[in-house]
Image: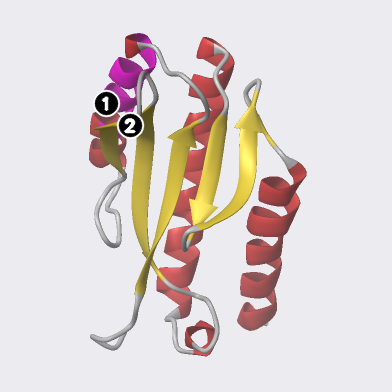
Amino acid sequence: MREEHPIDLLVAAVEGTAPDSIASSLRVLSEQLAGRRHWILGPPEFFDEPGVGAVRSLGLVLSIYTALPPWDEEIDRQIDRAHMEEVKELIGEICRISGEHDVSFVLEYSEEVIGMVEHGQMDESLEVGLIGEWERVLDERDQ
């Protein structure tokens, strides 16, 4: 990887009002994820920022090397595959928290909304558009 290869953020943020129990669960999850594997650019980080009124910004953020054009051809395939596995693990845990606490999450990549997790399930844009397409592209490159 070149030193100047840009880094994007995958953000999983609670949608709407979040009770303290969600904050606690996400903080614990971030600590658990940190110990599970080697993360290319570090484990997902917990954030809890005050907003306007009772609204707060709460969730996890994962740094990954961008695979957006024109950098998509420059990213190392092993790193790209490792990032995909990191993202799958993070979204899987977000689904678990969503189901256990009946809370929804909005996922953003490179400051654009890419999907939702609701009732413990990722929507089609995450399952097919992000994960499915990412796997397809990586499998094609491996052939």
CA separation, marks 2 and 1?
Answer: 18 Å
For label 2, count other residues whose C-alpha is less than 10 Å away and answer few (under 14), some (14-19) or many (20+): few
Q: Position of residue 43 (x, y in %)?
A: 27, 47
Asked if residue 47 is positioned above or below residue 111 in the image, the reply reads above
Give residue 57's quadrant in the image. top left
Disc 2 marks which residue? 51
Tell me where the magenta segment starts and ends, as one range: 21-30
Q: Residue shown at 30%/62% (left/top)? A: 40
Query: What type of secondary structure mainly makes up the magenta span?
Result: helix
Residue 27: mark: 1
Q: Amino acid at mark 2?
A: Gly
Quarter the C terminus occupies: bottom right
Q: Amino acid at mark 1?
A: Arg
- Assess whether residue 26 is covered by the magenta stretch: yes
Instruction: Name the foreground residue: 65 vs 16.
Output: 16
Residue 133: mark: none
Specify whether 106 is left or right of 11.
right
Q: Residue shown at 36%/51% (left/top)? A: 62
Asked if residue 109 is positioned above or below residue 1 in the image, the reply reads above
The local secondary structure at tag 1 comes to helix
Q: Position of residue 72 (x, y in %)?
A: 53, 83
Q: Position of residue 36 (x, y in %)?
A: 30, 39
Instruction: Name the foreground residue: 136 vs 13.
Output: 13
Asked if residue 18 is positioned above or below residue 94 in the image, the reply reads above
The local secondary structure at tag 2 comes to loop
Q: Residue shown at 66%/20% (left/top)? A: 119
Instruction: Name the foreground residue: 25 vs 84.
Output: 25
Instruction: Name the foreground residue: 27 vs 53.
Output: 53
Q: Residue shown at 24%/54% (left/top)? A: 42
Quarter the N terminus occupies: bottom left
For label 1, count other residues whose C-alpha is less than 10 Å away and answer few (under 14), some (14-19) or many (20+): some
Asked if residue 46 is positioned above or below residue 3 in the image, the reply reads above
